[in-house]
Structures are given as C-alpha cells and as structure tokens.
Image (spheres, rainbow, N blue to C red):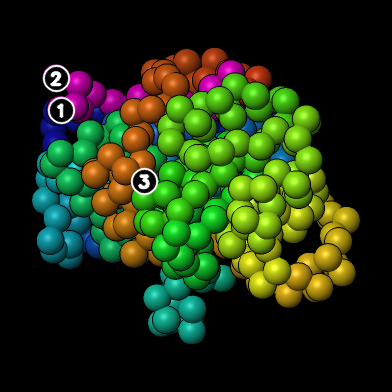
Amino acid sequence: MSNQRSTTMTALMKVARGAGNVELREVAVPAIAADDVLVRVAYVGVCGSDLHIHRDTHPNHPPVILGHEFSGVIEEVGDAVSGWRVGDRVVSELHGGACKACRLCKTGNFFACPHKRPIGWWTNGAYADFIRVPAWLLHRVPDDLPLLHAALTEPLAVCMNVFQRVPVQPRSHVVVVGPGPIGFLAGLAAKAVGAGSVTMVGRDTSRDRLERALELGFDHVINTSHDDLQASVLALTEGMGADLVVEAGGSEQAVQASIVAARKLGSIAALGVHSGYFQFPWNDAVFKALDMTFSFSANYLAFEQALGLLRSGAVPAHRLIDGVYPLGEWREAFERLERREALKLVLKVGACEDDA
C-alpha cells in the first residue's frame, strides 16, 4: 500500500436494520487479495434500491457500505491479477461471491448465482473513497467516455440484459411503462438498437418526465391520467398494440397497463421491482398469448453493450443526470429523489482526471 494513502476513508453505510440508520463513518481502507483490485471511486449513481435500503424496504446486510453504480480508477492491483494496471479507468459488475462452479455460472450467468453477494447491499459498495473489487468483474471505460457518464453503465446494462432475452425487433413498436431512470434508459436503448417507435407511459405525477421523454427523442407519450391507454396505443400502432412492452414501474397499475398495451402474441419485459403481490389479469394475458420475461441484474455482454451506447451518445448520459453531489451531501440527493424532483443524481466521491 502506498505510503501516501491514508489507512482510513469516509463511507456511507447502512449501520443497522430499520428505517434510516444510514450515516457517514470513518472505516479502514479495504485490503485486497491476490485476485482483487482496489478502485479509487470517482462517481456513484444513486439507485432506487439505495432509497429503499434507507427505508429498509430492500434486502440489506448491515453494517455495509452502500452504492453500486460506480466508476473509478484502479489504485492497486493484486499479485495474481493480469491485464489491469494502476490508473486504468473501470466500472464493475456486481457479482461478488459468485461461485463459478454451479450450472448458472458455468453457462455465463454469474449474475444469477445463488451464492452471489451483491456489491452495495450484501458486501461493501462504492459510497466510499475506495472499493475492493475482484478483477474478473471489471470493464474498461473507453478513453473518450467521461467517468461521470460511465456511472450509468450498470443501470443501462440491466436494460441491455433483458433485451438479450427479448430482442427489440427492427421497426417494432416499443412501449415503456414507468418514466423512472430504468424506463428512460430502456426506451433510449430500444431506440438505439432499431425500434421503429418508442412510447413512454406515465401519469400526471410524472407530467414533467413525460415532457422530458419527448425532448430526449421518445416518439410519443401517453398520460393515463387523461388518455385511454388501450385506445392511444392502438392508434399509434395501426390497431395492433405494442410489439414489446417494458414494464419499469414496479406497481400493480404498471403491470396491468403493460398487459393492456401489448398486442396479441406480443412480449412484456418486466424490470420493475416491488414487494408484495399484485392482482393480475390472467385471462387477458392468456387470450393475448403474451410472452412475459422477468429480468434482473446484468451479464458481461450487457455491460459491454451499455458502455458502447454511452460512448456513442446514443444514450445521452449528460441529459439524464440532473445533478452531482459530494458524498457528504448524500441526504439532500436522497431527499430530492424521494420528492421526484430529479430523474438521476450522482454522488461524486473522489477527484479524477475528468475534473480537469
């Protein structure tokens, strides 16, 4: 370890179960094993799951450092690591603890390994000056992609992961239900990979976001507080309905709206996360013969695809990020997102070359 580096760091932690119990603490800089790297964190996107952990409505294992949508620069490389060096700009998958031996791992689906201990709520995450990362989880950030923008890689990769399983067909009609960060990223990605039209669906509570969707290149928006969803979708799709619906709301209303919007023999990609049970219009889904695919997290290819879309500007990160806060102002960022005053906020943890 460098003599110039402190042995302690500031970290934002969930310190105990229960609502709240999130605070800044001084903790030891993590020691790395032979196959790890130590990353100096630059930026971390605030995820909805962070807000849920703050409310204690998402799984968490305190005491644990939060944060997983991060970018940074390698500070130290383990003795057994090859292909990486100090100074490399990186993002990371979250699959710490994946066993690499089960059937899921052996088929490349490390993100679904039952032994996985995800970064940021099970094992220590990136709301800190440094994070220890197994080297096999790393992805190189292109030189011409700012680290701030690279902080959106992980949530965009979640969208690309489901599109591997439910491909966006050329010139197809895609409807996104739920104008949150995942909904925006999924819609922009669908447009980038060839959808003919992309429509965002929301309610009056998201009126500003619906207007923003049009500004960002969505072809249409539907406000279900005023517009009949089925009639509106049919009018936009030559009477057929959507070829693919991305359910990104995670609510009973969003699930039901997705079934309404989908055409017969259409597909629904379910990305929204919620606890509890929904009333599900079973017969409507059956008699439309719908394919419904559930998805979470992301694989290696999805991360590479996400980096490519961010680098090209097809998914314009700079137009999605509404503010950057220092780590010490985390509470203001969380509260602003809870009040739905921003779409995506990022915490800046450390200085990096992008700040020059």
Q: How many marks are shown on the rendered structure?
A: 3
* Label 3 environment density (alpha carbons within 10 Å; few <14, some 14–19, many ≥20): many
Q: Is residue 349 magenta?
A: yes
The picture places residue 190, in percent across and down from the top left corner, at: 45, 52
Instruction: Please tell me which residue lies in front, 34 or 289.
Output: 289
Question: Residue under circle 1?
Answer: 353
Membership of 155 in magenta stretch: no
Quadrant location of residue 264?
Answer: bottom right
Residue 193 at x, y = what percent? 37, 56
Q: 169 or 238: nearer the eye?
A: 238
Contact? badges 1 and 2 (CB < 8 Å): yes
Measured along the vertical axis of the image, is residue 106 above or below residue 247? below
Give the labeled residue for mark 2. 356
Q: Residues within 10 Å of mark 1 (few under 14, many from 20)?
A: few
Instruction: Select label 2 or label 3 by which is in front.
Output: 3
**Residue 353 x %, y %:** 15, 27
- The residue drawn where x is 40% and y is 75% is 108
Type of amino acid at the residue the image marks with label 3: Thr
Cβ–Cβ under 8 Å for marks 1 and 3: no
Magenta stretch, residue numbers: 341-356
Give me the C-alpha separation between circle 1 and circle 3: 19 Å
Please give the label number shown on residue 153. Answer: 3
Alpha-carbon span between mark 1 and mark 2? 6 Å
Which amino acid type corresponds to the residue marked 1 in the rendered image?
Glu
